[in-house]
Structures are given as C-alpha cells and as structure tokens.
C-alpha cells in the first residue's frame, strides 16, 4: 500500500485511533480544538508528514507529531508508529492529584438498609459537610 502525501486531519486523527469515530474527530475540528503548527484548522485541512498537532480531548491537551500518514483505520499496534506523542508528562498526570486521598465509597453492612435522617446527619458531620 502506497503511503499518501496528504491526508485530511480529521481522517488521520481517526485512523491513528485518537478518536473513536471520524465524526467525533470532525466535530472536534469544528469546535476549534485542533491546531496544526499552532494554527487552528478545519477538518478538511490537508496534513503532511512532520507537522505537529495539538488536540484538546477530554480535558487533556495532547501534542502529537506526525511520523507517517495513513488514511485507513488500522489496529492500535500499527497506528502507534504513525505518530510521536509529545504531550508533557505533567499534562497526562494532571488529574492524578485530584484522585489522591479519594477513597472508595462507604459501604453499609448487608441488611442495614438506607441511613436514617440521624445517620445521615452524623455521616455529614463526620465528613465535614456542615
């Protein structure tokens, strides 16, 4: 299979499995959350090799460098060498600090039922919600 010289940015993002569907990739482009070389681009922008893409996905600012152009969706193992992830480690770990100290939800013993109003007040006082 010959590698293309230019590929639409939405098609490439879908092909390398950044987005689950091409329509999601197109919608993100339409909402101005995709930049190529620090310029906001439309979904129809033709991407070429060596360019840097910035994508906002689920609150993360991903930065990718295009290594190889593909226009058909491939498996994750084949898609991985098509780009280099330049996203800083701090960006990938930015939500971890939010989870630190967050325990599992409280469990009540089987058969105890729902807490009464008094139980709920005691729980809220213990947690410091007053």
Image (cartoon, helix red, strand yellow):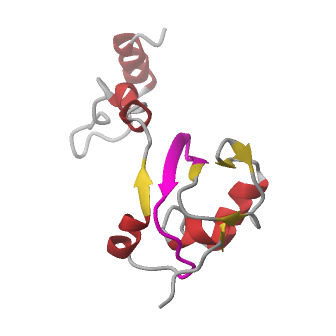
In the image, taking residue 85 as reference, residue 111 lies left or right, namely: left
Residue occupying the far left of the picture: 109
**Residue at figure coordinates x 76%, y 51% from the top left:** 31
| Residue 57, horizontal then vertical, whole percent | 57, 49
| Residue 110, horizontal then vertical, whole percent | 22, 46
Q: Which residues are magenta?
A: 54-72
48 up-or-down from 40: above or below: below
**Residue at figure coordinates x 51%, y 61% from the top left:** 18
34 up-or-down from 124: above or below: below
Q: In front here: 14 or 12?
A: 12
In the image, taking residue 88 as reference, residue 52 lies left or right, namely: right
Asked which quadrant contains residue 107, the reply is top left
| Residue 108, horizontal then vertical, whole percent | 26, 37
**Residue at figure coordinates x 38%, y 38% from the top left:** 114
124 up-or-down from 109: above or below: above
In the image, taking residue 26 as reference, residue 84 lies left or right, namely: left
In the image, taking residue 61 as reference, residue 45 lies left or right, namely: right
Q: In front here: 125 or 61?
A: 61
33 up-or-down from 97: above or below: below
| Residue 112, horizontal then vertical, whole percent | 27, 39
- Check if residue 66 falls in the magenta segment: yes
Asked which quadrant contains residue 113, the reply is top left
Tally of numbered tags: 0
- Check if residue 39 falls in the magenta segment: no
């Amino acid at each position: 299979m010959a590698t293309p010289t230019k590929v639409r940015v939405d098609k490439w993002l879908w092909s390398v499995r950044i987005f689950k569907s091409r329509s999601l990739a197109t919608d993100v482009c339409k909402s101005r959350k995709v930049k190529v070389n620090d310029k906001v681009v439309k979904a129809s922008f033709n991407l070429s090799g060596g360019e840097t893409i910035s994508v906002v996905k689920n609150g993360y600012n991903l930065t990718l460098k295009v290594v190889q152009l593909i226009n058909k969706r491939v498996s994750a193992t084949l898609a991985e060498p098509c780009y280099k992830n330049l996203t800083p480690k701090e960006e990938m770990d930015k939500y971890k600090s939010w989870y630190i100290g967050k325990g599992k939800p409280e469990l009540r013993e089987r058969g105890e039922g729902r807490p009464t109003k008094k139980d709920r007040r005691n729980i809220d006082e213990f947690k410091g919600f007053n």
